[in-house]
Amino acid sequence: MPLAPLPGQAVARSLLFVPGHQGGRFDKACQSGADAVVLDLEDAVPPDRKVEARAQMVQWLAGRESGGGAGPLVGIRVNAADTPWHAADLALCARKGVDALMLPKAEDAAVLRMIAASLPGVALLPLVETARGIDRLDEIAAAPGVQRLVFGTIDFQADLDIEGDGPELLYFRSRVVLASRLAGLQPPVDGVSTAIDDPARIEADALQARRFGFGGKLCIHPKQVAVVNRGFSPTPTQLDWARRVIDADAASGGAPVTVDGKMVDRPVVLKAQAVLRAMRPEHPETP
């Protein structure tokens, strides 16, 4: 698939996991400010409660549909393709109100092709969290129906016996970003921050992911959502700079011009346009 012009595209910044067997939390998650809520049937649900979790999701989805379905995007993290729960999970994802399917331990593009064929219109979010998944990134990214890649950092560290989520994973993060860009996908989603009551750490993690080209981050608690959203959004200062660049370029008719003592050329204009496209309604207006 050829490169696609995606800089600054407004995509889900925060994807909040909710245990699938705790239906009382579904509405609260939707009110958290998260751009997407991911109902989890995999790691968060014990084996003996998988059936119960699916039943709670069916009931909630039906109620949400009758209420108009407003709110954040809704995804479901299914169980892996080699588990006994996978087929029933896919059937659940065919219900109205499910926007995306997150596939854990994504390693085989053939599995994604089969899912895409059975669930047209449902965006696929392969969760890459093993060495084999990283090795097959290009194939996974090119599979039909794939909207964006998700990097499962914690499981990946365990698979490779890596200790640390900082420089130890920078090479792999860059590979995920590069594969996404080459396949024309939305910017990928970075893994979770295990910190819940440490906003500074969460913000640092989000800003690092943004610098490396990620467009969003997984969240495991509503307290993380606002910090993550802020980390992946342009600041008022950045928005002000972008508007001044666009105005200066328009006023010059494309002739060389400077803003803040720096030359404005085509790449700078494209960057400014990307910043403005990423603006969200919650951003305050700047002069």
Image (cartoon, rainbow, N blue to C red):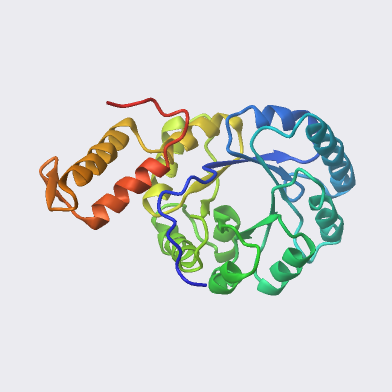
The structure residue drawn at horizontal position 48% and vertical position 45%, both measured from the top left corner, is 10
The answer to whether 170 appears left or right of 120 in the picture is left
The structure residue drawn at horizontal position 27% and vertical position 33%, both measured from the top left corner, is 240
Relative to 103, does residue 140 appear above or below in the rendering? below
The structure residue drawn at horizontal position 42% and vertical position 37%, both measured from the top left corner, is 279
Q: Residue 14 appears at what percent x and percent y? A: 55, 40
Q: Residue 166 appears at what percent x and percent y? A: 42, 52
Total marks placed: 0
Q: Residue 242 appears at what percent x and percent y? A: 28, 40
The answer to whether 168 appears left or right of 35 in the picture is left
Classify residue 125 by image quadrant: bottom right
The answer to whether 108 appears left or right of 152 in the picture is right
Classify residue 86 by image quadrant: bottom right
Quadrant location, the C terminus: top left
Seen from the viewer's position, the closer of residues 222 and 247 is: 247
Classify residue 238 by image quadrant: top left
Whether residue 108 is visible, yes or no, is no
Seen from the viewer's position, the closer of residues 55 and 184 is: 184
The answer to whether 179 appears left or right of 100 in the picture is left
Whether residue 216 is visible, yes or no, is yes
Q: Which residue extends farthest left?
A: 261
Q: Residue 245 appears at what percent x and percent y? A: 23, 42
